[in-house]
Amino acid sequence: MNVKIKAENLVKIYGNKTGKALDLFRQGLSRNDILKETGLTLGVAGVNFEIIEGEIFVIIGLSGSGKSTLLRCINGLLMPTAGSLVVDGKAVEKLDGRELRKLRGEKISMVFQHFALLPNRSIMDNVAFGLELRGIPTDERRKRAQKALVSVGLEGWQNSFPSELSGGMQQRVGLARALVTDSDIMLMDEPFGALDAIIRMDMQEELINLQARIKKTIVFVTHDLDEALRLGDRIAIMRDGVIEQIGTADEILSNPANEYVEKFLQGIDVSKILDASSISKWPREVMRETESVSVALHKMKVADTDYLFVLDPMKHLVGMILEEDLLLLANKKEKSIRSIIKEARAIKSDTVMRDVYPELRQAEKDLAVIDDEGHFLGVITQYTLLVTLEERKGGDGIAEH
Amino acid sequence: MLSIELPKFAIGETIEWLIRWLIYHLAAVFDLVSNALNYVTGLLSSGLTAVPSLLLIIIFGFLIWLITSKTTAILSAVGLGLVWNIGLWLQLISTLTLVVVAVIIALLIGIPLGILMTRSSKFETIMRPVLDFMQTMPPFVYLIPAVMLFGIGVVPGLFATIIFSVPPPVRLTYLGITQVSEEMKEMAIAFGASDWQVLSKIELPLALPSIMAGVNQCIMLGISMVVIASMIGAGGLGAEVMRSVSRLDLALGFESGLAIVILAMVLDRVGRSFASIKETPARKVICFFRARYNRAKNSKSQVLGITTANNEGGDT
């Protein structure tokens, strides 16, 4: 196992004259005391870690915990006040301007929370931006950018502009821009934080799939525990500039290092996994009433399922159709699916977890989740419920320690 | 009344002494600048007057059509034709020359100053009161040192016009660049951009609308000052206005005033077209040639399978 990035007693204090603040920190004063005494903010307070080649290393913490600061020390956007940050055996803080630019241009790329796409450039030119900075000829960088766009599923969008794309698509462009430089390391600063829940899930899934192919070293900053648990090969929990615990999801869940970590895990469990909407997922495909039998069959094939929920144009839940009925219709050469729409079992989004379970057992297929006006919000499958319960059990276990 | 004898600060006298010192010691420099400016404006205006007026109006109309739209171009040409018809064409040309030269120089000074202000907060704190001073000092006052330094004629007029029209491009360049979001700059740096690349590829392009608004403002102030500058012999339409005032000649006064209005409106529309990025005939022409150039280059280097290079121009 190859250590790719290594931090040794890394300290970052914001401001110009950090000498006094550093002394105070070494004397063991707290973050607040240092702020009171010197007016300077202690961003990262003596952190050690090693990131192994090819892993997704997630840094999680509340806002202001220093996670973004730590991330920016890796590519030298912020220079450490003390300590060292080593990438591939070289200390970043010792590089001169030219070497630093080379490091950023060729070895480390970055994905930003608010995408940071240039509105005056086409998608193609946004993706090729890193290569343009390095002076790579137009033809080659377009070819490479095209490839990167294909890999994030944005083929054919190269001549559009960022304002024409949805949030999720914009972040795909951000991802493509980071991929195109062929860097070994990808820094991701809450990349999915600005997206809505459904799209965030899709993007997480895609990142996992992508990572299986590209095998980069990814440092991923987030404040969302679910995201951390889903993506992270290893997770570092930060508080007030200090790493409280580093470990795999399993290690952290089953063996929290201290009370803070325990509370951190619990707090999120309780708030996140209490009602039906929090564990519902948008299905791969849904139907509209007006769509035909052949479309329905195609969608079922794509989504690998034997039923589909039917929605009206306002996204109200109309009902569901089953594959067996659909095949009968197809034999009769019927076009419309209206005749086979059945009532779908649905629950309100604020149904608490213990009431979801019996409902799901009674449901013929998966359970639809709707809001008070009958809008379809997503689906709870047997599998998601199982996974959720498993996680909850982990959470309860921690509480008993 | 209470009267206390206080020694007066000799501000005015100091400035006068400073100017006289400059004249005495740097006469050669001022002569050189004066000659150069005289030469440039002379060349430009004689070049413009050498072309038959009606042909020139048509050329102007065509150029305006390229960067704005058909309606603007026709109206501009009609307005200019009117000026020609009332016999103020030569004066209009000399005013136009003055404005164009003054604005170009003001931009060459103003935009870099605006960029410098974003780079050093110390420089910014110094520049702020200086800009206020330049903008609020009654423009007539500039005429005095201008005459002392350069004598009577076109060049002192240019000098005063430049001083008066420099602040907007400085301010709006500064404003435009400071409004570029930090995340954009951070992104560029994170992908390995040098300081120069951050400026040229991020800050200036994103600040362009604001900078262009500054260019437009600069042109407008330039026109208003050129009229005032005619008091010290800068000539042009302003001189006609001055003459009509001194003779109480309403007819001439109205006509020359109208000519200035027409020139100002034409230049404003042109300046506006810089400030807004729109689909103009010029863009279409540029796109057409760029596409052709790319195609030629592609076939030359025999790069196959790149269809995207040709689409560069066709994106808007």
Image (cartoon, rainbow, N blue to C red):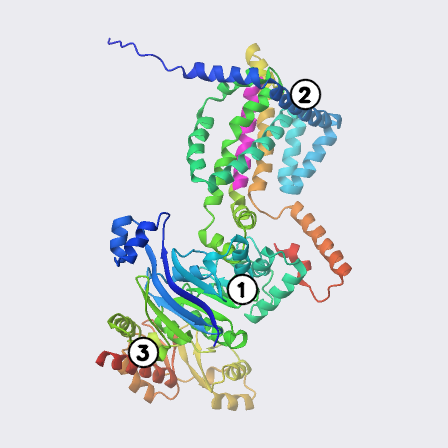
The image shows residue B78, relative to residue A352, as above or below, that is above
Q: Which residues are magenta?
A: B211-230
Q: Is residue A257 left or right of residue A229?
A: left
Instruction: Say which residue label 3 marks.
Output: A253
| Mark 2, other Cα within 10 Å: few <14 / some 14–19 / many ≥20 | few
Alpha carbon separation for disc pair 2 and 3: 90 Å
Viewer-nearest residue: A166 or A220: A220
Secondary structure that dominates the magenta span? helix
Q: Position of residue B38 (x, y in %)?
A: 66, 22
Instruction: Give a yes or no on whether discs 2 and 3 share a subunit.
Output: no
Dot 2 amino acid type: Gly
Name the residue rendered at 63%, 46% in the picture: B280
Residue A239, position in %: x, y?
30, 64
Mark 1 and 3 residues: CB-CB less than 8 Å, in contact? no
Name the mark on residue A202.
Answer: none
Which amino acid type is shown beneath numbered disc 3? Leu
Q: Return the chain for callout 1.
A: A
Residue B225 is one of the magenta-drawn residues: yes
Residue occupying image coordinates x 54% and y 73%: A214
Chain where mark 3 sits: A
Q: Nearer the viewer, mark 2 or mark 3?
A: 3
Depth check: give the residue in front, A163 or A32.
A32
Kindly identify the residue that appears in the image at 53 percent across and 41 percent down.
Answer: B211
